[in-house]
Image (cartoon, grey):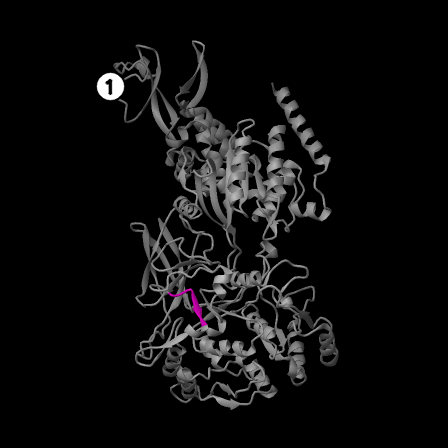
C-alpha cells in the first residue's frame, strides 16, 4: 500500500478552562500565553455549571454550562486542557491519558511551568518563547535596521485586561522575568501608557507586542469564519467580553479590537477605515461593494448599541457597514452550506511525502521549527506534526478516514505516542527533532474491525464480504467497479456464474449446484461491442475485463465416451485430456473434421463465478462506488462483517465525509452501515430491516443505506411498507440537530449511473437539479431518495407541518406506480 500527502508542524494547542467571572485570572492566562511559541492561538474555554452565563445560551435551551464548555472544546480541538481549578476537565469527561511517557492531556494552571534542578524554567507544554527570541535576534535583529519595526511595552494597569489581550503583556511572576528582559534586549520596545492613544497606535501604526513574537514561522489558513474587516467592540473590564474577544480573533481573520470605553477617541479612525473599505468589488457587474462589520460584545445592550450608531456612524453611506454577532461555538457542526464557522489554522512549512509501505508502515518526514534549542539552554520543547493525506491517487482500500478521538485517545494507534484524529488532520506530538517518523498503514476493513472492538462489538469478515472485497480488488478499486455498472453485463455475468437450486429427489428437497457456464468468444465480443456503443468508460472494453481476470479463454471439447462438452483452460489442454464428468481420459482427436468442431469459449473465474451475482458482491461494489461519489468524498470502508454480539451480518460499513475544495478543516465523518441487494424479488425482508435497526440503534448519528439493483418501481408493497417503517424509525429522535438514523435508499438508477447520482437523476428526469440540493450530503440524499421512492416528505418538512403521518396521496402514487409495473410485466409475458 502507498501513502502520499504532507506533514507540517504547529504549536501545541492549549485550551484554558476558566471560570467566567475572574478578570485577574484571565489576565494571568493571557500573559502566560506570551511565554510559549504560538501562545496567542490558544483558546479560552468558559467553564460554568447550570446557571451562570446566559449570553452563551439559546433562549429556553436545555443546554447546560458544561455542554457549552464541551462544545468549545469540540470547536477548537485543543491538544491539552489547562484547568484553573483541579477537576474541571474530569467534570467535562475529558480523558487524562498517560502522563509518564507522553505529553499530559490535563494540567492545572499551577503546573504550567516548574523549576528544574538548575533553577531554570521548564514549561510542561510547548516551546519556550526565549528560543524564538534568540533565533530572531541572530537572524533579524542583531544589527541596526534602517527601518525599525515599532515594538511596544505597555505599562501595567489593574483597571482592565485590554492590553493583556491586545498586543500582549508578559507575566510579572519572578521566575519568568527572563522572558520580559529578553524581549527588551532583542526588540528595544517603546514604553507606552495604557490609554486610547496607544490602542490607536496598535491599529494605525502596525505596532507590535509580545503576541507578535509567538507567531514566528507560522502561516495562517482562514477558517469558515471569514468576514470582511471586523471591528470588535468590547468592554475589557467584563470577563465575559474578554473571553469572547479572545476567541473571536481565533475564527475571524481580520479583527480590529475597540475598547468600548474609548469609542469616542476611536470613532474617526473606524469611520475612515469603513469608508476606505467601502468600494466596488472588482469584476462584479451587479455593483456589489465591500463592507465592514461592527461586532458588539454581549455586555453591550441594544440601547448602547443604538447610541453608538447614532453618535458615531450615522453619516456613513448605506451598506458601508453592518452590525454582526459573536460566533456560536456551541452550535452543532452543520453540513454543506449550513456548516458552522471554523477556527483559523496555523502551521509551519509543510514537507510532502509519497511512500510505499514496508511491513505495514511508511517512513514520513517529521518537520520542526528552526529554533528548537537555539539558545543551547536545553529546555524542554514539545510541538505537533500534522499529517494531511492526499487521496487523489491513493488506493481506496487504505484507511484514510477515522472518527475523531479528541476526547479519548487510544484508537487508532498509527504511530508511537498518542495519536490524534481531528478535523485538521492526523496529529502527532513530537519532543525530539530526529527528522522522520513512522506511520502504520492499514486497510479499511482492519480499521473498522478494530474500532468496532473498542465499541464492544467483535466483528469478523463474512463469507459474502470476502467475495465482495475480492470483486472490488479485482476491478481495481471502487471507481473501477464502474465496469459492472451495466445491466446487460450484470445479467451476462449472472448467467455464466454457477447456480444453486433445490430439486426434488425421492420425495426430498436437496440442493443442486450447476457449474458456471461458458460462452462462445463471439458472443462475448458482440456483448462488449454493443456495450461500447451505449456507455462511456475505459472499462467498457473486453480487454479490460480480461486484464482484471473476469473471463478466461479455453477450448470446448466433446468427450467421445459420455458426450459431455468439456471446457479446458490452456493449462489443462493436452493430447490426453480427462473428461470432467465421467473422469475418463481420451485421445484428443487431431483429424480435420474434429478440429473444426473445437471452439474457443470464455468462462468467468475467481469471485465472479460465485452464484447470485457474486453473492451480492456486485451490488456492494456499486453501492460503495455510488457513495464514494467523486473527489469531494473521502471514505474508509469495509465489505460484509459478522457482528457477533448483535448476532447479525451487514453488507458494508464505512466512514464517509464530504470535503470542499480549499477547506482546511474537514467535516467529522459519518458512520454508514448498509444492506445491498441484487435482483431478488422481496429481497428487502424483515431480517434486513431488523439487522439495520440493531446496528443503527447502537450508534446514534449512523446513516443506514439500503440498495438494490432493481428499479424503484419494482419494489413490492411489502418492501415499501418495511422501508417506510425503517425510515420513520430512523427519524424517531434527533442527534446533533438531524434525524438520529436517516435512511438512504439507492436503486438501479443510482448504482448503474455513469454520471454520479445527480447526473443520473438529471438524465432520468430530463431536467437540471437546483444547486441547493447537495447530494454529496448523506442527510440531504436521505430526504431526496425517500421522497423519490417511498413518497416520504423531507424530515424538516414534516417537522414544520407538525404531522405525525404522511399524506395518503404519497401511498396512492406508489400503488399506481406498482400497478403499472405489474401490467407491463404481464404484457411482456
Q: Is residue 541 above or below residue 24?
A: above
Q: Is residue 156 above or below residue 694?
A: below
Quadrant of the drawing holding the C terminus? top right
* Residue 557 screen position, x and y as percent: 33, 17
Q: Quadrant of residue 602?
A: top left
Residue in the foreground of this view, choosing between 674 and 646: 646
* Residue 820 screen position, x and y as percent: 67, 26
Residue 676 visible somewhere in the drawing: yes
Q: Is residue 551 above or below residue 153?
A: above
Residue 775 visible somewhere in the drawing: no
The answer to whether residue 481 is left or right of residue 63 is left
Tag count? 1
Q: Is residue 240 above or below residue 138?
A: above
Q: Secondary structure at mark 1?
A: loop
Q: What residue range appears in magenta?
A: 103-108
* Residue 582 screen position, x and y as percent: 30, 13
Residue in the foreground of this view, choosing between 690 and 634: 690
Indicate yes or no whether the magenta region holds residue 258. Answer: no
Q: What residue sits 34% from the left and 64% below the top?
A: 100
Indicate yes or no whether the magenta region holds residue 105. Answer: yes
Residue linked to disc 1? 575
* Residue 273 screen position, x and y as percent: 64, 78
Residue in the foreground of this view, choosing between 546 and 371: 371
Mark 1 residue crowding within 10 angstroms, few (<14) / some (14–19) / many (20+): few
Q: What residue sits 37% from the left and 64% below the top?
A: 99
Amino acid at each position: 500500500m502507498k501513502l502520499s500527502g504532507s506533514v507540517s508542524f504547529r504549536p501545541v494547542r492549549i485550551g484554558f478552562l476558566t471560570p467566567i467571572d475572574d478578570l485577574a485570572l484571565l489576565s494571568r492566562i493571557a500573559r502566560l500565553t506570551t511565554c510559549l511559541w504560538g501562545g496567542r492561538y490558544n483558546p479560552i474555554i468558559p467553564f460554568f455549571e447550570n446557571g451562570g452565563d446566559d449570553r452563551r445560551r439559546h433562549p429556553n435551551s436545555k443546554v447546560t454550562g458544561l455542554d457549552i464548555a464541551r462544545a468549545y472544546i469540540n470547536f477548537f480541538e485543543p491538544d491539552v486542557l489547562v484547568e484553573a481549578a483541579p477537576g474541571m476537565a474530569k467534570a467535562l469527561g475529558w480523558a487524562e491519558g498517560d502522563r509518564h511517557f507522553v505529553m499530559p492531556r490535563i494540567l492545572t494552571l499551577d503546573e504550567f511551568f516548574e523549576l528544574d534542578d538548575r533553577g531554570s524554567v521548564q514549561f510542561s507544554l510547548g516551546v519556550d518563547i526565549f528560543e524564538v527570541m534568540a533565533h530572531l535576534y541572530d537572524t533579524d535583529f542583531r544589527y541596526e535596521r534602517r527601518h525599525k519595526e515599532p515594538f511596544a511595552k505597555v505599562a501595567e494597569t489593574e483597571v482592565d485586561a485590554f492590553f493583556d489581550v491586545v498586543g500582549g503583556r508578559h507575566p510579572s511572576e519572578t521566575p519568568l522575568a527572563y522572558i520580559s528582559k529578553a524581549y527588551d534586549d532583542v526588540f528595544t520596545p517603546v514604553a507606552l501608557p495604557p490609554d486610547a492613544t496607544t490602542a490607536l497606535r496598535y491599529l494605525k501604526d502596525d505596532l507590535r507586542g509580545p503576541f507578535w513574537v509567538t507567531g514566528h514561522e507560522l502561516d495562517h489558513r482562514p477558517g469558515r469564519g471569514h468576514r470582511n474587516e471586523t471591528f470588535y467592540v468590547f468592554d475589557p473590564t467584563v470577563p465575559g467580553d474578554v473571553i469572547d474577544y479572545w476567541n473571536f480573533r481565533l475564527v475571524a481573520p481580520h479583527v480590529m479590537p475597540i475598547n468600548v470605553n474609548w469609542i469616542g477617541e476611536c470613532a474617526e479612525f473606524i469611520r475612515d477605515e469603513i469608508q476606505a473599505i467601502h468600494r466596488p468589488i472588482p469584476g462584479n457587474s451587479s455593483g456589489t461593494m465591500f463592507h465592514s462589520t461592527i461586532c458588539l460584545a454581549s455586555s453591550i445592550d441594544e440601547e448602547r448599541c443604538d447610541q453608538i450608531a447614532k453618535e458615531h456612524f450615522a453619516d456613513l453611506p448605506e451598506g458601508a457597514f453592518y452590525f454582526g454577532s459573536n460566533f456560536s461555538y456551541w452550535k452543532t457542526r452543520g453540513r454543506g452550506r449550513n456548516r458552522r464557522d471554523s477556527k483559523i489554522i496555523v502551521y509551519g512549512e509543510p514537507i510532502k511525502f509519497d511512500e510505499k509501505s514496508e511491513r505495514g508502515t511508511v517512513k514520513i518526514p517529521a518537520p520542526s521549527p528552526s529554533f528548537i534549542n537555539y539558545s543551547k539552554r536545553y529546555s524542554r520543547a514539545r510541538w505537533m506534526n500534522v499529517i494531511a493525506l492526499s487521496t487523489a491517487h491513493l488506493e481506496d482500500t487504505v484507511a484514510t478516514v477515522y472518527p475523531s478521538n479528541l476526547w479519548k485517545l487510544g484508537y487508532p494507534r498509527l504511530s508511537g505516542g498518542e495519536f490524534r484524529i481531528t478535523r485538521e488532520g492526523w496529529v502527532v506530538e513530537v519532543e525530539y527533532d530526529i527528522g522522520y517518523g513512522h506511520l502504520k498503514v492499514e486497510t479499511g476493513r482492519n480499521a473498522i474491525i478494530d474500532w468496532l472492538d473498542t465499541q464492544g462489538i467483535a466483528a469478523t469478515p463474512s463469507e459474502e464480504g470476502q467475495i465482495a472485497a475480492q470483486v472490488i480488488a479485482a476491478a481495481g478499486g471502487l471507481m473501477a467497479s464502474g465496469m459492472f455498472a451495466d445491466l446487460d453485463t450484470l445479467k451476462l455475468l449472472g448467467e455464466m456464474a454457477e447456480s444453486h437450486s433445490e430439486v426434488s429427489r425421492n420425495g426430498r428437497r436437496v440442493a443442486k449446484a450447476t457449474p458456471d457456464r461458458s460462452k462462445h468468444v463471439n458472443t462475448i465480443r458482440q456483448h462488449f461491442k454493443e456495450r461500447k456503443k451505449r456507455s462511456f468508460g475505459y472499462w467498457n472494453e473486453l480487454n479490460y475485463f480480461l486484464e482484471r481476470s473476469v473471463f478466461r479463454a479455453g477450448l470446448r471439447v466433446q468427450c467421445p465416451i459420455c458426450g459431455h462438452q468439456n471446457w479446458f483452460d490452456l493449462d489443462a489442454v493436452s493430447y490426453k485430456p480427462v473428461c470432467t464428468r465421467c473422469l475418463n481420459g481420451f485421445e484428443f482427436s487431431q483429424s480435420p473434421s474434429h478440429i473444426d468442431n473445437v471452439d474457443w469459449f470464455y468462462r468467468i473465474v475467481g469471485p465472479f463465478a460465485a452464484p447470485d451475482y457474486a453473492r451480492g458482491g456486485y451490488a456492494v461494489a456499486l453501492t460503495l462506488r455510488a457513495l464514494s461519489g467523486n473527489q469531494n468524498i473521502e471514505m474508509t470502508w469495509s465489505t460484509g462483517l459478522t457482528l457477533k454480539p448483535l448476532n447479525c451480518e451487514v453488507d458494508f460499513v464505512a466512514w464517509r465525509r464530504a470535503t470542499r475544495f480549499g477547506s482546511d478543516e474537514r467535516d467529522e465523518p459519518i458512520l454508514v452501515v448498509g444492506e445491498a441487494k441484487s435482483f431478488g424479488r422481496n429481497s428487502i425482508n424483515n431480517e434486513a430491516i431488523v439487522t439495520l435497526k440493531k446496528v443503527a440503534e447502537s450508534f446514534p448519528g449512523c446513516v443506514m443505506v439500503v440498495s438494490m439493483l432493481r428499479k424503484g418501481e419494482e419494489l413490492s408493497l411489502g418492501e415499501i411498507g418495511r422501508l417506510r417503517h425503517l425510515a420513520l424509525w430512523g427519524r424517531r429522535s434527533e442527534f446533533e440537530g438531524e434525524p438520529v438514523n436517516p435512511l438512504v435508499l439507492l436503486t438501479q438508477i443510482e448504482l448503474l449511473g455513469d454520471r454520479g447520482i445527480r447526473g443520473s437523476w438529471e438524465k432520468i428526469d430530463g431536467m437540471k437539479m437546483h444547486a441547493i440540493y447537495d447530494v454529496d450530503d448523506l442527510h440531504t440524499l436521505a430526504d431526496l431518495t425517500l421522497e423519490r421512492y417511498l413518497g416520504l416528505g423531507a424530515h424538516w418538512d414534516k417537522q414544520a407541518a407538525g404531522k405525525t403521518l404522511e399524506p395518503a396521496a404519497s401511498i396512492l402514487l406508489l400503488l399506481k406506480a406498482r400497478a403499472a409495473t405489474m401490467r407491463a410485466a404481464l404484457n411482456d409475458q
